[in-house]
Image: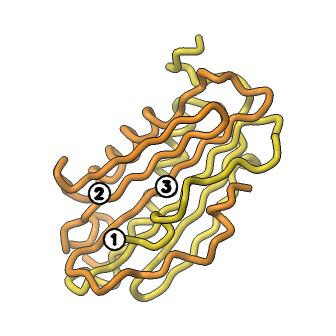
Chain colours: A orange, B yellow
């Protein structure tokens, strides 16, 4: 399992006004996997699109960092969410 | 920013035969955010669906762990991917 998974749960940073969503993706290629298999760019687009279905976010609210290695690639997406709860959430 | 983001990049575990994808989501509710705003269950469905658009994965290949707190909720999705590269990837 990826080592960052076994760390203790994320601790909230100082109180922030807005909701924040952080997504970390790690793709570990197995011996059988093909080096070209690159899921992260596709998943980045789809994940941001999925969030946009529920919450209005602008491009300026989304920060993406990607790192590619032979055996491991990782993607970090940080999103500042508006205050309102998602359209489908109980909060409405 | 969430503390788990500043850790060094995930280090690959021992060589595995299959590709593996790990997704960590953390939702930090700001002071202005509503406690009911719960994006993670929706995002879990959409992310797995997004992956399925590109890669055939069975329910048994997907492992999900979710933790909910007042200020912070986190979701961990671990997926074992088949060896073949995704349909849209360069590898084809």
Mark-to-mark CA distance, 1 and 3: 23 Å
From what the image shows, is residue B15 above or below residue A2? above
The residue that disc 1 covers is: A89
What's the chain of the residue with tag 2?
A
Q: Quadrant of the C terminus of chain A?
A: bottom left
From what the image shows, is residue A16 above or below residue A76? below
- Answer whether labels 1 and 3 touch (C-beta < 8 Å): no
- Residue B87 x/y as whole percent: 56, 20
Q: Is residue B24 left or right of residue A6?
A: left
- Residue A81 x/y as whole percent: 24, 65
Location of residue A79 (image quadrant)? bottom left
Residue situated in front as seen by the camera: B76 or B5 = B5
Residue situated in front as seen by the camera: B32 or A41 = A41
- First in sequence: mark 1 vs mark 3: 3
The residue that disc 3 covers is: A24
- Residue A88 x/y as whole percent: 32, 65
């Amino acid at each position: 399992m990826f080592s960052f998974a076994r760390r203790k749960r994320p601790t909230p940073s100082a109180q922030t006004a807005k909701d924040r969503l952080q997504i970390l993706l790690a793709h570990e290629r197995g011996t059988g996997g093909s080096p070209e298999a690159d899921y992260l760019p596709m998943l980045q687009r789809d994940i941001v699109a999925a969030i946009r279905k529920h919450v209005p976010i602008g491009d300026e609210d989304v920060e993406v960092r990607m790192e590619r290695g032979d055996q491991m690639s990782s993607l970090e997406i940080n999103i500042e969410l508006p205050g309102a709860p998602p359209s489908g959430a109980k909060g409405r």
